[in-house]
Amino acid sequence: MTLLSPAHAGTRPGSTPGSTTPRLELHVPTALARFRRLRAALPGTAVHYAVKANPHPDLLRALVAAGSSFDVASPAEVLACLEAGARPGDLVYSNPIKLRADIVESAGLGVRLFVVDSPEETRKVAEAAPRSAVLCRLVTSGEGSDWPLSRKYGCSTTEAVDVLTLAESLGLEAAGVSFHVGSQQRDPSAWDAPIEASSRVFAALRAAGSSPWLLDLGGGFPAALEGGAPALDAYGAAIRRALRKRFGSRRPRTLVEPGRSIVADAGRVVTSVVAVVHRGDTRWVYLDAGVFTGLVETLDEAIRYRLETTATGPSGPCVLAGPTCDSADVMYEKQPVQLPLSLAEGDEVVLTSAGAYTTCYSTVGFNGFAPLPTHLVG
Amino acid sequence: MTLLSPAHAGTRPGSTPGSTTPRLELHVPTALARFRRLRAALPGTAVHYAVKANPHPDLLRALVAAGSSFDVASPAEVLACLEAGARPGDLVYSNPIKLRADIVESAGLGVRLFVVDSPEETRKVAEAAPRSAVLCRLVTSGEGSDWPLSRKYGCSTTEAVDVLTLAESLGLEAAGVSFHVGSQQRDPSAWDAPIEASSRVFAALRAAGSSPWLLDLGGGFPAALEGGAPALDAYGAAIRRALRKRFGSRRPRTLVEPGRSIVADAGRVVTSVVAVVHRGDTRWVYLDAGVFTGLVETLDEAIRYRLETTATGPSGPCVLAGPTCDSADVMYEKQPVQLPLSLAEGDEVVLTSAGAYTTCYSTVGFNGFAPLPTHLVG
């Protein structure tokens, strides 16, 4: 438990002490700083912000102005980017499985680069967006990640060569390869194996006379959540090393798709304590935000937010639960959190590094509790 | 896998073949039939529909007209019931943990009966809604339920006696006891132990001169999901037996709080196949609805919907996933489902008994995929 630092104790610029809780306080300049830091850590790599992490229009506008490109997965996200001032050529449509109508609509809006991972999807893109470019997504292990990816997406290197060869035969441009090492990835060397695998796909295609030119290194760069992770520079160094080792002088153009690492640290979910109840030997703390109002990533206690509070004094363990009358609305129970023993109804509890995958994961208002609103601060 | 029966093959009254998917088709008459069946199975017990399961205004209006009472957990749900024509006296506010402002607002709207489960919450109700009535919630094991409740709510019988005694000393009416045996409870005898426990609380209070009069038997009555469950009559018989055995001639007034058992069977989620992809030996079927568009209860594969489809021919196993570019958006993977081998892009797949905890669990539009809409049919 980190006590609230004086800089955040109601005096943060733009913060309105006493505002309604729960709310996400989003500090766009922090997101821009993270964007610039990631870009500096990966020179020559295009940064495509993953809109799904937090699609707030002010954030998208600021990122466009800062020179960001975007990673999208639906026509609604394409439109959000275009409305924020992005050009269609700045977008990679990274959802490997797409509704046919969504491809048509997105291509109509000017999107030209789509991710695929199967012959079926390649044929679909060839029909719905003729002459566009495709990246083929490789499967990865997800090891070392807090939110490991399942086998939902991705194919083997052999299949990728077949898919990209098929793409060319269907009049598509075989642009290259993509992969994703899993969200909140704590191991910078996690990119080594998929970069090596990608280099084999590139070599096979080049041997067959194709000219792949683009490698999508995915997302997975961490935010400063509980437990910590290496600095972004360490990721940049590890990735540059792997690219040099595997591609030598024939390094393709590269892009990354960060979401969490850009926006998580730019947001804090401010909640109020609804009740503190002792059940047997266990202290239960109930907040006015929970699993159904944005804190979905606490399911299975996968993502552990750092907590700050205005309450002071010695701390002790407690279970943290949400406000709805749903027994699944419990954030941390197996591994309790530490909060001051003095914590009482009405105290504020702040979940830090919570700008990603919170507002967008809110339900439409389950049990009559409104979706988590965003308050821009700063 | 159940093939689509002729009665549902696009000719169902009110259904619009070719309507946009995904959608929840809600058939209010089926919900009313379930309401009447549960009321008949439990003569003399008030049926309070749990609004959180599906708060569609047309459903609430129809239930009011049929004589239903309601179980609510927030001022928004109180208002939804009042707007549908319910009287405040028809409502039990069953959330044991409540925001102080929500109690004040609900009491101002006329709500008089609140559930508590701790001295802290009892004091809060006494201050925020003086002279109202309280039920004290007992903890239960949740055994035999598909969606077991955690230890989030409820206290021991000893604590309940203390809580209700405290309530009286604070000017509240100690109305009685509540409990909940867990959602989609497949064992009608699950009510035996908490009814026995409740009878001990009643006896202790009566011995001390109090006059508790109300027993809230909670929800948990099942819908006809995959795997089946006994008929509602079996639950009615088991509960009546337990009440007779434990309370004899001093049976209190009783109420139940069904949600799923009323509305689940009244709804079907109609989806379209986005893609069928073979990954190694595994067939992946991607639908245009998923975990973030209403199918949250598939998490950990807890609730298994029965599937119907227009595709025909022999079936085989497949993993079922949703449309968002999120690796968590997978419904059934550990225990695959059976669907026709001929299933292809554009085919409809219907999830039956899906009227509860779907539309209300939708996200606000994660990844640009809109919340699950409701189409009234019939």
Image: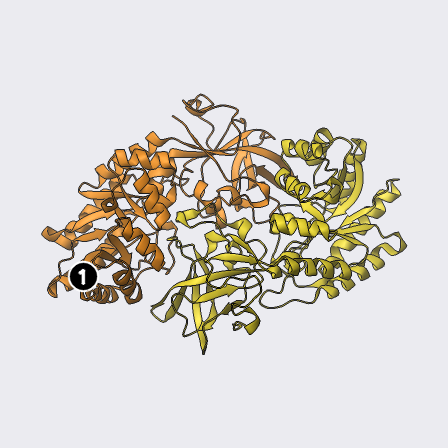
Chain colours: A yellow, B orange
Q: Position of residue A133 (x, y in %)?
A: 77, 38
Q: Amino acid at mark 1?
A: Arg
Q: Quadrant of residue A320?
A: bottom left
Specify whether residue B121 is in view.
Answer: yes
Pick the residue in front: A283 or A377: A377
| Residue at left offset 80%, top offset 47% | A214
| Residue at left offset 61%, top offset 55% | A148
- Please report, as a chain letter, where disc 1 is located: B
Specify the quadrant that holds the C terminus of chain B: top left
Q: In this picture, is B171 found above or below B363?
A: below
Secondary structure beneath label 1: helix
Query: What residue is pinned by disc 1?
Result: B200
Name the outermost residue toward the top.
Answer: B11
Name the outermost residue toward the bottom.
Answer: A314
| Residue at left offset 88%, top offset 43% | A207
Q: Quadrant of residue B375?
A: top left
Pick the residue in front: B15 or A140: B15
Q: Position of residue A238 (x, y in %)?
A: 77, 63
| Residue at left offset 37%, top offset 55% | B149
Q: Is residue A233 left or right of residue B369?
A: right
Decide: few, some or many residues near mark 1? Use Cα within 10 Å; few <14, some 14-19, many ≥20.
some
Q: Position of residue A84 (x, y in %)?
A: 67, 45
Specify whether residue B279 is in view.
Answer: no
Pick the residue in front: B302 or B165: B165
Q: Position of residue B141 (x, y in %)?
A: 33, 58
Q: In this picture, is B21 found above or below B294?
A: above
Number of numbered discs present? 1
